[in-house]
Amino acid sequence: MQTLFLRLLGGRLRTVLTVSFALVAALTVGLNALVVSRVINDYMASAEAERVARDMKLAETFYQLKLDEVAAISHRLVLDQWVVENFPAAARGDLQAIQIIDRQITNKIIVLALGGTHLIAVLDADGELVTGKVLWPEGTLSSALTDGHFGDLPIVRTVLETGKPQAATEVIPKEFLAQVGLDNRAFIPLLETPLAAPEPFDPREGTAGLALVGVSPLRDGSGRLMGAVLTAYMFNNDYTLVDRIKEVAGIDTVTIFLGDLRVSTNVLDEAGRRAIGTRVSQAVRRVVLEEGQEYVGRAFVVKEWYITRYEPLRDHKGNVVGILYVGAREAAFRSLVQSFNQRVALIAVVCILLAGVIAVPIGYIVTRPVSELVEAHRRLAAGDMAVRVQTHGNGELAMLGRSFNTMAETLHRTQQELLHKEKLASMGQLAAGVAHELNNPLGTIMLFADALHRELPPDDPRRSDLEMILKEANRAKKIVADLLNFARQQEVLAQDTDLHALIDQSVESVRHQPAFAEVEIIRHYDPRLRIIQADPAQLQQVFVNLLNNAAEAIEGPGTVTITTRALNGQVEISITDTGCGIPEEYMDKLFTPFFTTKPPGKGTGLGLSIVYGIVKMHRGQISVQSEVGKGTTFTITLPVRWVGEAERLAPAAQGEVIG
């Protein structure tokens, strides 16, 4: 069997693919019975976990939005100019001031997004109630409340002591609720509940209220703390939030607990009433209330099984005071699993038939480009750098073909660059040796010729011969200097450089030359780009050289256009002229040392070689496009920041020599 399997894999790719398709289809039927149970269980577990997790996130979001809404009411009231200006008088018992603040409270409380039981209380610095109102679930408002003390409520005391706003889920004891007429609304009788703990988690359960509370400090114009504004939304016997979460978010059941007591829920008991007054099981209480952890599990709720999740609710000090619960019906997942099982057999049969139908054409489609790539690799390995493969579409095989073409082009370009660099290095060594050997004799010739020229009288006919010697010696000296510049392309003095200012300096240094008399220089700068890291002296040499070449290529009036453009971490500089252009046969030789199309005595053929070397030392690229009779464009691409060995080791300081 092993030998047969190895021979199959070692055969033609089309055969391997066809047989593989057939084997996959056959194995699908054979393994289907074994894996279907695991797939169903895994899917159900995953779906259940995701559904309940999603439900809890949605419930928490609604819960937080409601808390933000409550906190925003108190915050807006402390910023209300009418409240701030009239509070001192209201605190002293001025009825008119109290009425003004009462109207502002009414304006704020009636625009709440949800109904429910709400309280707004304006307190003085001791926590005494100055004025307040209660909004009942039916939408009615209480009369103004002017008697009560909330200074001992922990969240109020914290705000009055620290002067910082607070918003959290809080337990409001019965004695505070009684002051504003909410004690009866908060009362919930505790019902006997199976599996619950013998005693309530919080002894205040049944009489205290669980509420979303926001308290903001109230300050006068000078910033002095005058009091606070308390806003509360009480959950006890109020179902607006849990029902809204159920309707809008599509959650099966939502419950809010004070301690382990249900105070707001849409879970129904066997009589069809809301299960208010029942308590959570002891197992959930231990994990959520006592340990402060979330609880996820399967539970039987009243009439059917639910997948549940419980999250602890904490007050402003971080103490666990209640629970937020969501539950999803398990029956929904079971029906989905059954539907899945009914389709498994049909899918397996269809897969076998489809595999047989599409195996042969897919094998051909897949193997043809692979065969072309194999042949192209063989030719590339044999040295054929011009080989390319045709690609169609955007699939993986097309991407592989394009990658091969890119690789071949890169190899060809790299090979040419290496050859060019080797040639430049050899020519540089030769040029350096020749330049140094010629420098001393030239200096001697120029010294003695100049001395003789100075000694001869003005009318001596030999002066013209000496002037010719000096002129030609100076020209030879310039050639030697160019040779030395060409040989010294080994270092870059990298520093922050204003590219546009450097180009402007280069333009100013050449524009007064005779060659630029009828040439208009146009500059188009990218405003997003100014500073790059480069050697300004070497770059100026590049720009001056290219500008001179552009001007010399123009006969009569013409233009030279300089364009900069910011790329992704790079800058592109283009210099375009309207000159005579460069013949196609010269394009491959432009950067070769000593190659020139100028007449004898007009150029050394080193200018573009020096330009090429400087650009390469800057980790850049240079390219040229030209059309005879229309003009030439040299394009230089440089990194905005210097990248090289020095940058990998340590940040390069300005003026650091990098080579």
Image (tube, rainbow, N blue to C red):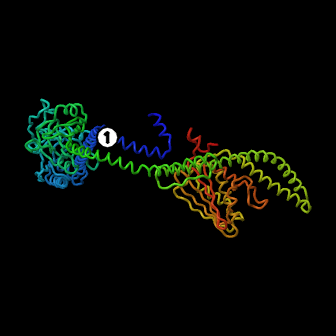
Number of marks present in the image shown: 1
In which quadrant will I find the C terminus? top right
- Residue 380 is situated, as x and y percent measured from the top left of the image, at 61, 48
212, above or below 508, in the image: above
- Closer to the camera, 209 or 345? 345
In which quadrant will I find the N terminus? top left
- Closer to the camera, 365 or 595? 365
Quarter of the image for residue 129 reads: top left
Task: Give the SS element for disc 1.
Answer: helix
Q: In this view of the protein, can residue 225 be seen by the observer?
A: no
- Residue 29 is situated, as x and y percent measured from the top left of the image, at 33, 42
- Closer to the camera, 313 or 136? 313
Q: In this view of the protein, can residue 304 be seen by the observer?
A: yes
Instruction: Say whether residue 65 is left or right of residue 558.
Output: left
Instruction: Say whether residue 229 is left or right of residue 384.
Output: left
13, above or below 625, in the image: above
- Residue 391 is situated, as x and y percent measured from the top left of the image, at 51, 54
Instruction: Say whether residue 503 is left or right of residue 236.
Output: right
- Residue 595 is situated, as x and y percent measured from the top left of the image, at 73, 55
Which residue sits at x=66%, y=54%? Answer: 542
Specify the farthest residue to the top.
Answer: 198
315, above or below 564, in the image: above
Which residue sits at x=47%, y=51%? Answer: 364
Instruction: Say whether residue 81 is left or right of residue 354.
Output: left
Quarter of the image for residue 207 reads: top left
Q: Amino acid at mark 1?
A: Asn
- Closer to the camera, 20 or 511? 20
Q: Residues within 10 Å of mark 1 (few under 14, many from 20)?
A: some
Residue marked by disc 1: 32
